[in-house]
Every structure is written in structure tokens, then in C-alpha cells.
Image (cartoon, rainbow, N blue to C red):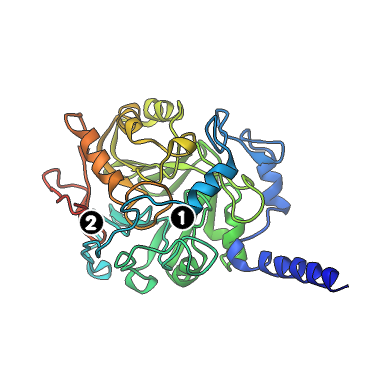
Amino acid sequence: MFKYFAVAGIIILILIMANHPIFGGTIKGKRLERIKKSPNYKDRVFQNLSLTPSLAEGFTMRQVLWEFITDKTENKKPKNLIPTHKTDLKNQSITDNFLVWMGHSSYYFQLSGKRFLVDPVFSGNASPIPGTTKAFAGTDIYSAEDFPEIDFLIISHDHYDHLDYKTIKELKPKIKTVICGLGVGAHFERWGFDENHIIELDWYDSRNLDNGFKITSTPARHFSGRLFKRNTTLWSSFVLETPSKKIFLGGDSGYDFHFKQIGEKFGPFDWAILENGQYNEKWKYIHTLPDEFGTVVNDLNAKNIFPVHSGKFALAQHAWNEPLEKVKQNSLGKNFRLCTPMIGEKMSLDDKSQTFSEWWK
């Protein structure tokens, strides 16, 4: 009898946990009806443009989990504090065009009088389980209190290292408009956001944001999910056109032909913000490998490159600073400018002469 009570207790606990707001909202009603009309939705889930297995051929999930449990990657987490420089965001002129990186894929930028924030994670960890996937010591230097009013919050997809419940709740009073992929708005509505302040886009949907500002959702090769089922919401990259610049916001993506298509349709780009980190041959279809980085830049026809998705969390089996070292090596002699600011450092979006130290060494 005790065995049955124990099983029932575990089931109840799982149900209670699954109902926690951290896991987000449920796709239903008019949102689900819109999703069903998407050409990227089939068999009750969103699909990549190309066949995209979670793991590359020859690998199993059991093998990957075991390697994570027994992982002894050298220098996976920094032994010393990572150098940072905290820019005072509230006291910057709105006429100043700049970007500040907060580590991993979180960054704030100003362009032509508008303020943008992308994939903010400031809670200290990138997991629904407290105390796991913790930020490197000294990297979590920004909080919601440090930000001015945000005109546009952009979310690439709903994984925990890009969409953080605690951070979003704390930022909520400052956010005017949320821009995200189809379905992701359900999370924001669950967290108290007005549906009229949420813009959900399918791939190649566009929205005029203001005079001279336009955003288009573009494909990425990745996946989504916050609990048990994957791919019920759409993962995206974005093309942002402003009165002065055209920027590609890459999100997470493995390499595929969509980069070339985006470059031909929207390029050249003044800036491309591309993932560079948490890669592995085992999951090469959903994250860009270092030796593919230059090809992505060429496909997009981008002039200035800012690499993200590193520097704050250890989500793969490589040294914490390997992504930056490799992207630096792979950019030598190329026809693009690589920009590698430290966390919190103010990076001008206008000054082509600005240089950056190899702070990760």
C-alpha cells in the first residue's frame, strides 16, 4: 500500500511543479489556431527547414547524459573572476548608438532613439532548478534595476538560457512591447503581460515598429521547449531595420542554407550578432560550430560581427574561453570586423575604429 501512496505522491508533486509559472503558458485558443496555419507547423509541432535531429549520427542521448555526468573538461568554468566593466545604462544619452553585452546571449542596445533588450537572463542561473547551471562568478552584474524603460524586448526562443521567468517578472514594469516567435507570447500572458503589448511573428512575418523601424522574424535551425514537449513554440532569428542601420539578431542556430537566403534577401548587414559557444559535434545541427562561423558571416554579407552565447554559463564540453579564442583565430584575414567587448563594456555601433582587448586570456 505504501508503494502506491509513494507513486501517487510523486505524480502529485510532478503535477504541482509542472503548474509552476516558471514553465510558462499553454498554447490554446486563438493562438493555437493561428499556429496551425503556419507553414512551419506540422504534426502538432514546429519544424526546421531541414531535417534536424537533436543529436548527430552515431550518438545517443544515454551516451551524452553519461558524458555530462562524468565530464572532466579542463577549464570548463573560469578559475578566476572574469573581468567586467559595468556601464551605467540609465544615464546614457538616447541619441547615443551603442550595445552592452550582459554575458551569454543577453544584450542591450540603443539605436536612433529606441531602446532594445534581447534574451535577458539576470537571475544567476539558466535552469528551472535553483542552484544549477549557475552563472560564472562575477558575470551576473546586471539586474532589472539597472535598466531604463525598454521600448522593445526581443526573445529568440523560450529556452531557459534565453527566457528567464524571474528576470522577465522584474523587468515587466519597464517593458513597452515584447517581440517573439509564434507561441512564445503564451508565456508572457501567463506572467501578466497584456496581449496587446506582445508581437508574435512567424518566419518572414514583418512588423513596422515605429517611423523607420521594422523587424522581420527569420528562420533559425534549433528547437524550443520549457517542460516535457518540444517545439510547441517557434524559435527565430530577426532582421532589424532602423533609420541608420540593418542588424541581424541570430539567436541560436545550427548551420543551414537559411543564412544564405537571409543574406540574399536582406543583406548586406551593418551588424550581425551570432552565437559562438555551447557547441559540440554531437549537436552540430542545432548550434554553429567554430569552423562554420566564417561561412555564416559570408552568407549573411555582414560587416561587423558580435559573437554571443558564451562567457557566462557552462552548457557544453569545452573550456569557457575556447569560443572567443577560436572565433578570434577564425576571423584573422577575413573581410569582416570582429568585436569582442567584455561583459558590461560599452560598444559603439557607429565607431569603426573602436578596439577590444583579449580579456578572456
Residue, far right: 1
Q: Residue at x 61, y 62 (%)?
A: 23
Q: Amino acid at mark 2?
A: Met
Q: Is residue 142 left or right of residue 69?
A: left
> Is residue 86 among what the camera can see?
yes
Q: CA distance from mark 2 to mark 1?
A: 19 Å
Q: Residue at x 52, y 39 (%)?
A: 205
Badge 2 marks a residue whose secondary structure is: loop
Residue 162 is marked as 1
Q: Position of residue 321 (x, y in %)?
A: 28, 50
Q: Amino acid at mark 1?
A: His
Q: Residues within 10 Å of mark 1 (few under 14, many from 20)?
A: many
The residue that disc 2 covers is 342
Q: Residues within 10 Å of mark 2 (few under 14, many from 20)?
A: many
Residue 21 is marked as none
Quadrant where the image shows the N terminus = bottom right
Q: Residue at x 32, y 71 (%)?
A: 146
Is residue 203 or residue 106 the one in the foreground? 106
Q: Could you tell which of marks 2 and 1 lies nearer the N-terminus? A: 1
Q: Is residue 137 left or right of residue 60?
A: left
Q: Position of residue 18 (x, y in %)?
A: 67, 64
> Is residue 219 among what the camera can see?
no
Q: Is residue 270 above or below residue 49?
A: below
Q: Is residue 134 above or below residue 156?
A: below
Is residue 92 or residue 58 the one in the foreground? 58
Q: Is residue 210 above or below residue 149?
A: above
Q: Position of residue 56 (x, y in %)?
A: 52, 32
